Amino acid sequence: MEEYAPIVQLLNDVADGEPKIITLDLRKLDFLNSSGINIISKFVIKVRQQKNIQIAVKGSKQIPWQGKSLKNLQRLMPSLSLELE
């Protein structure tokens, strides 16, 4: 998890800035292990609790893990906008 600390800090800094919308473009992310998925999930939960930020996630249907894992983010935050190309 130590390797993810800079990413977690970046995500937290973005959320703390309270933008109206945060877009995560993951279309070219070929692989993400369970720790990475956990980090994104925790980020979505954090943003959901703030209630004033919308999340848009862009993914690729061509990358197998994205279809299933990114749809699970909508379960964590039903208002999350998911676009799979």
Image (tube, helix red, strand yellow):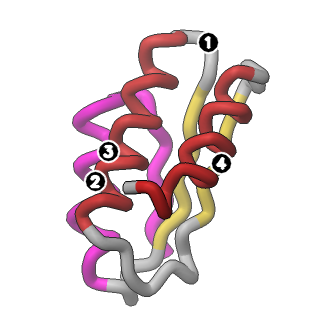
Instruction: Residue under label 3, please give it.
Output: 73
Q: Mark 1 points at which residue?
A: 52
**Circles 2, 4 touching at the beta carbon (< 8 Å):** no
Marks 4/3: CA distance?
13 Å
With respect to residue 84, does 40 lie above or below? above
Residue 16: in magenta span = no
Say which amino acid is labelled 4.
Thr
Q: How far apart are the alpha carbons under marks 4 and 1?
A: 14 Å
- The type of residue carrying mark 1 is Asn
Q: Which of marks 1 and 3 is nearer the N terminus?
A: 1
Q: Position of residue 5 (x, y in %)?
A: 54, 50
List x then y, in percent, for residue 1.
37, 55
Residue receiving disc 4 = 23
Of residues 7 and 65, the one nearer the viewer is: 7
What segment is highlighted magenta in the picture? Answer: 64-85
In the picture, the disc for residue 71 is 2
| Residue 64 coordinates in the image, percent (x, y) | 27, 83
Q: Earlier in the sequence, mark 4 or mark 1?
A: 4
Instruction: Give the residue drawn at x 74%, y 24%.
Output: 20
> Secondary structure under badge 3?
helix
Q: Do the residues labelled 3 and 2 touch (CB within 8 Å)?
A: yes
Above or below 21: residue 66: below
What residue do we see at 65% from left, 27% from top?
Answer: 15
Q: Which residue is drawn at 45% across and 77% down?
A: 60
Whether residue 42 sits left or right of residue 23 in the image: it is: left
- The answer for how far apart the CA atoms under marks 3 and 2 are is 5 Å
In screen coordinates, is 28 left or right of 70? right
At 68% from the left and 44% from the top, the residue drawn is 10
Q: Residues within 10 Å of mark 2 (few under 14, many from 20)?
A: some
